[in-house]
Structures are given as C-alpha cells and as structure tokens.
Image: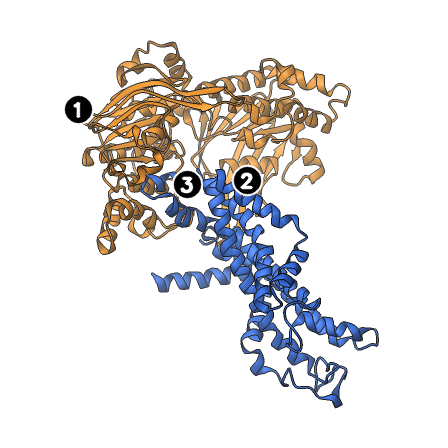
Amino acid sequence: MSIPLLDIKALTVEFGTRRGVVDAVRQVSVTVAKGETVGIVGESGSGKSVTSYAVMRILDRAGRIAGGSIVFGGINVGKADERTMRDLRGREMSMIFQNPRAALNPIRSVGRQIEDVLIEHSLATRADAREKAIDVLKAVRINDPESRYHAYPFELSGGMCQRVVIAIALACRPQLLIADEPTTGLDVTTQKAVMDLIRELTAERNMSTLLITHDLGLAAAYCDRIVVMEKGRVVEEADTATLFADPQHPYTRRLLQATPRLDSKVADLLPEEDSRRRTPSARPPGEALLRIQDLVKVFPGKDKGDEYRAVDGLSFEVRCGESLGLVGESGCGKSTTSSMIMRLLDPTSGSIQFNGEDIGAVPGKRFAGHPARAGLQMVFQDPTDSLNPRWSARRSISDPLMRLGNVRGSALRAKVEALAEMVGLPEHLLDRFPHQLSGGQKARVGIARAIALEPKLLILDEPTAALDVSVQAVVLNLLVELRERLGMSYLFISHDLNVVRLLCERVLVMKAGRIVEQGPAEQLLDSPEHPYTRELLAAIPHPPAGMVPSPIRGEPQAMVR
Amino acid sequence: MSLSSVKNFARHARYVMTENPVTALAALLFLLIVIAAVAGPALVPYDPMATDGGRALQPPSWDHWFGTDHLGRDVFSRVVVATRLDLMISLAAVAIAFVIGSAMGAVAGYFGGWADRITGRLLDTIMAFPLFVLAMGVVAAAGNTIENIVYATAIINLPFYARMARAEVNIRRHAGFVQAARLSGNGDWRILAQHIFPNTLPPMMVQISLNMGWAILNAAGLSFIGLGVRPPTPEWGIMVAEGANFIVSGEWWLAFFPGVALMLAVFTFNLLGDGLRDLVDPQRRT
C-alpha cells in the first residue's frame, strides 16, 4: 500500500477542565489514502469532531495533542509551526462545518469571501479574483453565479450557504476535505444535493474526504471506509460493505440497530433484551379530537402589500388516540401550523376545533387562562432551548402543574417524581440545571413537562431531531408507551419520513403550506403517489438494505443513559 | 435543599476566585471597602471632624499616617470614614437605576410597539445630554442635598440598564422555553418576571459593578464642584477639592490619599464585574 495522504497514529487529545484533565480522544489511528472517502461515525461525545480539529490544529485553547502523531502529506501536523499550518489550512486541507450560516461572515457578500481565500493563498490577483470567484460558484452548481456573487449569506437558503462554504473550502483545490456534519440541519433533499455535490467534486479532483457524521445511513451512502468511534476510542474500522454486512463490535451493532430503516418497527430500534421495547397496539380510531378547516396564515412580505402564505388552506383532523404524522421540509409551514394549533400564533383565517370547541377564535394572548389550555401540550424540537437555563428540572416540570393544575406542596413533589419515573428520569437528576443534563435527559424533562397535565393532544415537533440515534430509539419507545398509558393523541411533526412511519398510523405530506398527499403510513411510504413524496423518500440515505443486524449479545441497555 | 445550595454556592464562589486571581484580588479589596464602610468610624484613630490648629498641614508620619489637613484634621481618619457615605450614595443610586431601568427596558423589550417607542425616545433624550452636566443640572434645580445626588446619579445611569435589559429580553422573547412557559399557562407578566428576566441577570451584574465605580466617581465629582455633600463632612470628592489648593505649595497628601481611595474603589468595582457574573450564572456551576 502506498503512503496514505493523512496518517493519524495513536492520537490522544486532552482537555483541561474544571475537574482535571479529560481525554477526549484516546489512541485513535485513522488513515486516509489519496482519493478515498473515509467516514468517522459516532454519537455526541465520541471524539469524532475533536479528531478532525486536531488534524487542522484548531483545537480550543484548553485542548492539546498529548500523544501520537498526525502526518499529512509528509508534514507532521502535531509539530509544525503556526506558519506552516496557515499555509496548509485552506490550501492543502480544508473544512466544512455543521452550520453553514455561522461559517460565513454575515456582512460580506459571498463572492468577496471567496475572493478573500483565493487572494490569501495567492491563487488570484485583485484583477482576476472576481472572475475566478464566479468560476468557483459555478463549480458548486449555483444558479446565476454572477448575481449570487453579490448576495449576502442571509439572502441565501441553508443549502445554498453550504454550497458557498463548499465553494470556499474547495477554492484552492486542497487535497483533503474534512466535512464535519456537513448536512445536519439541512432538509433531506438538500442533504442529498449537497452530498452528491461533494462526492462529484472530490472525485473529479481526486481529493480525499474525511466525513464526520452521526448518521450511519449517510456514511453508508457516501464513504468507502467507515471508522466507528465511541467515547474517544475507535471501536471498529472496516470497508462500508463489510461493516454493514458483518459488524463486529457490540457498539456498532447497537448503532446499526438504532438507525431506523425502511422496514424497522419502533421496538426493533432497541436490543431484544431491552425492557423499554414497545409495540404500538392498533386501536380503532375514536371520534375527531382536533379538526382543522381551511387554516390560513399570511405573513407580511418584504415590500408593502407583499404577502407570504405560510399555511394555505389546510384541512385535516386528528382522532382520539390517533398518531398523525405531518411531514415536510423546512419552510413548508408545518411549524407555523403547530404554533397555530398550540395557540401561540393567531391564524389569519380558518377554524381550529378542539373537542368540538372553536379555539381558533380565542386570541392567543388570552389563551393562557383558557380551560382547553391543559389539553393541548407540546414537546419542542430543541430540548436545550426549550428549558429555562436558570430553572432546575424539577421546577420546569412543576411549572404547568402549578399554573394550570393548581397542585402545590407535597402533592406537587410527589407528582413531579411520579412523572420523572414515568419518563425514565432518575430522581436525583431533578435538582439539576439543564446544562448539567445530557441531551436525552433534557428531552425527558421536556416530555415530562408536556405530559404533566395529561393532555389530550400532544404535538411532537421533531422531538428527536437533536438526539443521538441510540437516545432517539429509547425516546421513540417511551413515546409509544406513554401514548398507550395516558391515551393521548399525537401530532408528530418531522422532516424524517422514516421516523414518522415508526410512530404514526396516518401521514400528511406538506409542501408550500398545502397538503400534497395523505394516507395510512405504510401505504404512503410503500407506494407514494405524489412526486414530492417520492423525492423525499428517495433522498433519505439508508444503511444498505437487506442487512438485518444479528441479535446483540452482551452489554444490553448499558449504553443509553 | 437550602443548606446544600448554600454549600454549593460557597464551593462555586471558591472556584470562581481560584480560577481567576483578579477576581480574588477584587473580592479582597471589596471586603476592605465594606469593612471600612461598616466599621470605619469605630476603627479610626482620630475624630474625623476634630480640628486642631496647632497640627495643621503635617506630612504623613507615624502619628498621622496620611498627614493632617489645613484644619489639623487627620486625613487617614477622614478617608476611612468617607467610605460609608460614598458607598451609600453609589449603592442607592445604582439600586434605583437598576430597578427602574431594567423594569422599563424589560417591558419595552418584551412588548415592543408603543411601550418600546416611548421608553426608547425617553432614554435617547437622557442620553443626548452630557451626563455629568445633566446630573449637575438636576442637583442644582432640585436642591443641594445628598438625596438629590442619589437621584441625579440614578437618572444618568438609568439608560444603560434599560437598553441592556431591552436587548437581553428581546433576544429571549421567542426562545423555546418562553413558548413552553406559555403552554404551561403562564401569562405575559409572569413569563417576563419569572422566565425571561432572571436570565438577563449575568450580563446585568457586570453592568452593575462597572456602574458602581462610575457612580462613586460621579458622586465625588459633584461634591468636588461644590454640589451635594458639603464641608466639613468627610467625603472623597470634597477632600480632593479642598486638598487641590495645597498641592501647589507642596502639601500633596491632602488630595493624594482621598484620590487613591477613590481610584481603588472604582478599580475594585470594575474588576469585580466578571466575577459577579460568573457567580450568578448557573451555567458556570457544575
């Protein structure tokens, strides 16, 4: 085998923290050959991003390379001086970050930002920079590059911004591209477009790519070789096909199992011995609990008289005990719809009937004291953002009970503890603040708060989007269990058809404020009729089909906390 | 719960101090200032008001550490005793400015619209004046008393709190936890008071601390030009003003020591800000 382009040997990275030195990465060895795409897959805290930062030598001040070596194209990155690194970064290896909007300078036009990189690395002069920048924009398939050259990041969509970031990263034709969760936060169809673009461009230029991701499906679709990391260590490394056909390490198997695939049921996501596995029981749907008719929300546009119809004549109903999925990409109006149903936002027109009463007519401002308030609750998308940072978990869960349930004193204490137990949150965590809890624990606090008043309808707004797949598996099973126990109806909002199918009997597909297709979940996913539904389905990356992981031996449960 | 939370807080305070030596230094100076303010009159060797013509204008010595002034009063005693008055004025002024300013700003930031427009223009009007001149004007118009110094200082500090509170509340207005609070049946005022406002405290603490120093300087400045506190009351600004006449003739200690005290007090509060923020921010606690 020839000398690899990037050779990481026994890398150890330490971080100095309040509680002493922590090893974020321990004895990690990864190689990337010329022209190869290697995926580093792992959940949060696995050290996958830290590894890539170490390669670029852009670790936080508290972090340092404590052991091992990183050799890139014959240069020892660990020992190189800052000048050498500055030449390497951008020109020889570059990086794409998770949030494209944050990676771009908001007050500089995208064309200028590309020029900056070209001029910095002496690949263009002031005279021809503009022309070259436009060529670069063309290379990442941005329509009408001459006018996009003048656009500012806020004028572009997330996918467009990521293309610009890619354009900047590839402007100097580096040999190695590190993509750190390049499509997290993007819609599935955009994700596909962006990933396809990265694959094409890197293949064209015979570049190597290091793809850092939490999504096994994505890694499967785009990587030649996959390295699985857990808690700072590499647990398994294999060719993509081998890894999926015959995973060796128990952690890899659990990860594979927790990743929803086309045919999995919600219980399949957890190991067989896991006591938290649940199977939704098919129940005859009851009468209509929520009935939406001709719901319209119009926002004023940029110019006077201009308007934007975020929700455009939506009608559907949720029956008692039913789980309804609402699927669509960002900007399709699904979040606006949920805000209107939750009465956080007033509809422009149309009616929202809940339990036979038109709650759409009650102004949102005054709905806090309405008797129907307790019956309508919601689990928010971002568990961190939805908890008051200054309130302990106990206080957050108590809040609805005190305000609407009128529970006080020891009864309140008992109720909160019962709720915590119900959602699987250990009691000693109740007095912690949100930043002291993990993502999964925060999600549980959010769920406990939402079910505290035993609502009839629970809106789940991408409740697992911010969670690791193994935690998502547990939370999805928990949601199935809670629905059975409390007899709630769910309105499950998501962009991920795979996850929606696990939980919902019926699915609505939304686009540009309208429903384009609806039907029973299985039917809609097996034989979609509308082209948009088909496009959505095709864009989801899957682990290779037909591969069912063998039953997991040993270490049941231990992973998910 | 309460005992353990006190313990936690103490542990956290110790951590904040050890992590940042500047904070520890500031805390030490602050302690010194507080002791001087509380127990100053009982500790000092001489009566700060007692005049003694025979010992006038003596340079610093073992008997009179900071020397004596033109009326034979002990400068050290006067500097220490003055701490209480200066601290009280600035503390009261900052408290008033903080309470009213942050309430105004929070309401403006949360409700927006007319509330925002009216408070915004009001604050702009205050900010349009050179602030010290405005304070002079207020004291001159309202009467030459200590209370009026407090009010004047509070008025000129108010816009800073109001603007900061407005900005901090405004960015949290649509946060997820605010929507969740609404779903839990909280009304607007409760959301503002219990959910949003406490989250604005960490940056406000820095502002309070910086402002304390500034308020001391402002109060001393007003006394320096003869407004507010009147001689023979010991007060740093007056002492500097009185001492300034003697610098030319070589009696530097009259103005120097109260000046140093003033500088140290301002310095302390400026340094204390970051430490205070770390102390009230639960996210810094682990």
Is residue A339 visible in the rendered structure shown here? yes
Q: Secondary structure at mark 2?
A: strand
Q: Secondary structure at mark 1?
A: loop
Say which of A541 and B274 sits in front: B274
Disc 1: which residue = A287
Disc 2: which residue = A11
- Res B245 label: none
Decide which of tag 3 and tag 1 comes sooner along the chain: 1
Disc 3: which residue = A384
Q: Chain of mark 1?
A: A
Of badges 3 and 1, nearer the viewer stands 1
Question: Residue A48 placed where, x, y %?
Answer: 49, 35
Colour of chain B, in one word, is blue
Report whether A380 appears left or right of B46.
Answer: left
Q: Residues within 10 Å of mark 3 (few under 14, many from 20)?
A: many
Of badges 2 and 1, nearer the viewer stands 1
Q: Secondary structure at mark 3?
A: loop
Chain coloured orange here:
A
Q: Chain of mark 2?
A: A
Give me the C-alpha separation between circle 2 and circle 1. Answer: 60 Å
Question: Residue A324 placed where, x, y %?
Answer: 27, 24
- Quadrant for residue A314, please give it: top left
Is the residue at mark 2 from the same chain as the one at mark 1? yes
Residue sitting at x 57%, y 58%: B154
Q: Amino acid at mark 1?
A: Glu
Residue sitting at x 40%, y 36%: A382
Q: Amino acid at mark 2?
A: Leu
Q: Are marks 2 and 3 in contact (CB under 8 Å)?
A: no
Q: Amino acid at mark 3?
A: Thr
Report whether A174 appears left or right of B256.
Answer: left
Give me the C-alpha separation between circle 2 and circle 3. Answer: 32 Å
Q: Are marks 3 and 1 in contact (CB under 8 Å)?
A: no
